[in-house]
Amino acid sequence: MICTLSVFNGFKGLNTKLLSVFDPDLKITAIEGKVFDPTTNIFKKVYDLSEVLQICDVLQENAFVRYGDRHEIPVLKGVDPSYHHFVQIDSAIIDGEFEKAQFETPFWMAFARPEVEGTPRNLFLIEEDRGLRFINMQEQTVSTLFSTGNGVYRPRTMAFTLDYDTMIIVNDAGSWTDIGTIILARDPLLGRFLDSWKTVMNHKQCNGGAVHPITGEYWFNSYEKSQVYKVKDRSTIPWKYGNATAINPNGSEGLNYFFLVQDNGWEFNIQIAPSGSFAYIVSKNKHYIARMEFNSATGNFEKPQPYVGFINKAGFAEGVGQSALFWEPHQGTFDDEDNFYVADGLNHCIRKVTPTGQVSTFAGRPGNSGYSDGALRDAQFSGPFGIVYDNINQTFYIADRGNHRIRTIIVE
């Protein structure tokens, strides 16, 4: 099997046109070392070129930022007063054709309805703390369905009902009375999702939700105590959710849960295998993945058990089970053999988890943040957090957050 990674596959022009919002049309960088003297004669010749409209001096370096148990690797830039002439620094969210569109914080992705073989599937993208985007692969355009605000400030994950007529988005809010889950409905006449959302549940600190691919039931969580709930009734608003025997009052503390994954402050999402027989709990801030089995007799998931990665130990290591290490794993996706490909954010790579618990690197250079296309292990990412797999067209799509891009891996 030969795999090639490139932003160009499936996204016309992204390789050369869809740059970060903070990048100019042309950059001059040092061949050796990190800095050079922009006052030398060779730069004066560049300044004098009639084709050059503006030049800006920039000093740039990667940094490591930690806030509590969260980590990020931002790029720090020192710029001169003319910098605003080069970039739209006031907004990184730009809609339009692929050659024009810009991403800022690509974070979580999901496919629209399945397409026939040979036709790429349209994508929905959550931009972290920014809103929801729609990537139309047929028309090669990007549009914004909604921006954050009005109580929805931290959309985290999205899922679809089995008929793809309702999109379910969770919102990480601070109290039980805040907006916890919203939905967007598909217009039956227009055949597209409306750009207005509706609140269906009020609850606290939800990081993830998923629809069971067989039963169609919706499962979601809360960060506060690592609770897991199931929606019992979607026929009326607010939706009714709880555990096997009891319902929680909407907007009150959800004491009726199925189980606690571990302890307080567990940031995780739920990702159910296509067969519906099991699901993974991917804990971003605790750096591991648990597995929970689905009991078809009761129609419920059993309490998850640690599967791969070591709880509270960030790092990088290949191996089986708890001998493997992750650093802020986030979204994952399944292939037809139940292999699980997960975006390992701060290791800057894509990891592969087999059904037997073997962990290996699928793409990227572990611990080496950057941007480059090429063969799987030569390519570079910068904080990839989202990934989906189109098994019909054998294409992975990666939300490369630090590079402000959507990347693709074509399986050939």
Image (spheres, grey):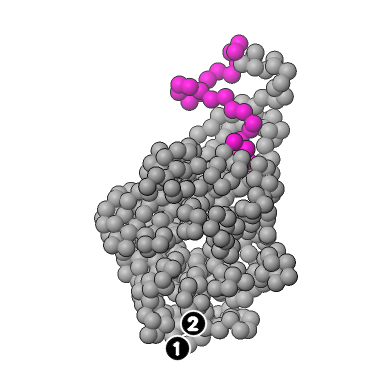
Say whether residue 65 is left or right of residue 58: left
Could you say where residue 224 lies in the image, as x and y percent from the top left?
Answer: 47, 69
Q: Is residue 207 above or below residue 49?
A: below
* Residue type beneath disc 1: Thr
Could you say where residue 331 lies in the image, as x and y percent from the top left?
Answer: 46, 58
The residue drawn where x is 59% and y is 28% is 27
* Residue type beneath disc 2: Gly
Q: CA distance from mark 1 to mark 2?
A: 8 Å
Considering the numbered disc 2 on the image, is that residue within a helix, a strand or a loop? strand
Q: Nearer the viewer, residue 11 or 34?
A: 11
Extreme residue in the bottom direction: 245
Residue 274 part of the magenta-drawn span: no
Extreme residue in the top direction: 41
Q: What residue would you read off at disc 2? A: 242
The residue drawn where x is 37% and y is 60% is 339
Using the rendered image of the protein, determine whether residue 15 is visible from the camera's viewpoint: yes
Mark 2 surroundings: few (<14), some (14-19) or many (≥20) residues within 10 A: many
Mark 1 surroundings: few (<14), some (14-19) or many (≥20) residues within 10 A: few
The residue drawn where x is 64% and y is 31% is 25
The residue drawn where x is 30% and y is 49% is 317
Using the rendered image of the protein, determine whether residue 173 is visible from the camera's viewpoint: no
Q: Are marks 1 and 2 in contact (CB under 8 Å)?
A: yes
Considering the numbered disc 1 on the image, is that residue within a helix, a strand or a loop? loop
Could you say where residue 295 lies in the image, as x and y percent from the top left?
Answer: 37, 80
Q: Is residue 143 above or below residue 300?
A: above
Q: What residue would you read off at disc 1? A: 245
Could you say where residue 353 lies in the image, as x and y percent from the top left?
Answer: 34, 57
Residue 33 part of the magenta-drawn span: yes
The stretch in magenta equals 16-42
Q: Nearer the viewer, residue 214 or 368?
A: 214
